[in-house]
Amino acid sequence: MSRYRTILIFGAPGSGKGTQGKILGKTPGFYHCACGDVFRSLDTATELGAAFLEYSSKGQLVPDEMTVRLWHESIRKTAESGKFKPSRDYLILDGIPRNVAQAILMEEHIEVRRIFHLSCPDRDKLVARLKKRALRDNRLDDANEEVIRQRLATYDAESKPMLQHYSGVPRNDIDASMTPLQVIHEIIKGLLDETASSPEQ
Ligand code: ADP
């Protein structure tokens, strides 16, 4: 089986990965998969659902093997259902892989063609966005500032080193403090470069 042609949206919690991913997912030729949404769709009475609650409420990552297995199962079903057509669509991944170990586990499934890194050095801005989201989306893991700070620390310690792991992959570093419209503009410019070299699109 060939690997899924994949674009990663990468950035700290609150950097806008989901907002941008959802916009792209509405575009023909792209399928958006957010790992956090896959977790949130689980029944919390199941073993995995309970593990998700336990780790996410502390601002920690769910263990890698469990996470990659769940993601793979979910994307395989989506491809089987025809919603995601791997021969036609780019897979837009948001929130996975989230560390180098996950990137290695996923290598047999995905071919990473480009990374959009939504970068926001202003941590207070991220915290403010997450607090707003907590109220809007009823996100338990965003409600408490201590958990938010822990999630940002987890990002710095575990997720950021992934950029080094993918240093051979074309990457666009985008200022995540811009408006959503400006950010999607930058992403689309990068995607036009990407698809120009890909005759299938
Ligand atoms: P955000 O975009 O704010 O980081 P997500 O919805 O992507 O939020 O993730 C929420 C929580 O779900 C994370 O804090 C983590 O506990 C868990 N999670 C999501 N994706 C992964 C992953 N790839 N590996 C491990 N845990 C994950």
Image: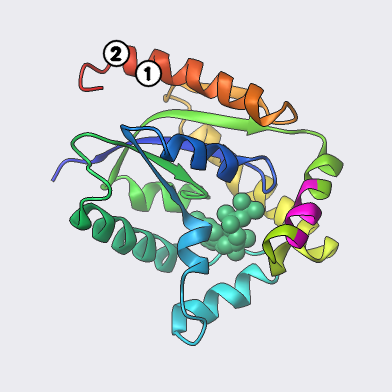
Q: Count numbered badges in the picture.
A: 2
Q: Is label 2 within 8 A of ligand 1 (CB to nearest ligand atom)?
A: no
Mark seen at residue 122: none
Most frequent secondary structure within the magenta stretch: helix
Q: Position of residue 23 (x, y in %)?
A: 50, 37
94 inside magenta stretch: no
Tell me what residue is drawn at x 49 percent, y 78 percent: 49
- The local secondary structure at tag 2 comes to loop
Q: Which residue is mark 1?
A: 194
**Local crowd at mark 2 within 10 Å, few (<14), some, or many (≥20)?**
few
Amino acid identity at mark 2: Ser
Q: Position of residue 155 (x, y in %)?
A: 66, 49
Chain part drawn in magenta: 129-135
Can residue 63 be seen from the camera position used here? no
**To which quarter of the image does residue 2 belong?**
top left
**To which quarter of the image does residue 107 belong?**
top left
Tell me what residue is drawn at x 23 percent, y 52 percent: 79
The one nearer the camera, 47 or 178, is 178
Quadrant assignment for ligand 1 = bottom right
Tell which residue pokes out farthest to the bottom in this image.
Answer: 45
Tell me what residue is drawn at x 30 percent, y 63 percent: 73
Can residue 132 be seen from the camera position used here? yes
Q: Are marks 1 and 2 in contact (CB under 8 Å)?
A: yes
Query: Is residue 201 placed above or below 7 in the rendered structure?
Result: above
Query: Is residue 31 placed above or below 188 in the rendered structure?
Result: below
**Local crowd at mark 1 within 10 Å, few (<14), some, or many (≥20)?**
some
The quadrant of the picture occupied by the C terminus is top left
Q: Position of residue 177 (x, y in %)?
A: 75, 30
Q: Which residue is mark 2?
A: 197
- The local secondary structure at tag 1 comes to helix
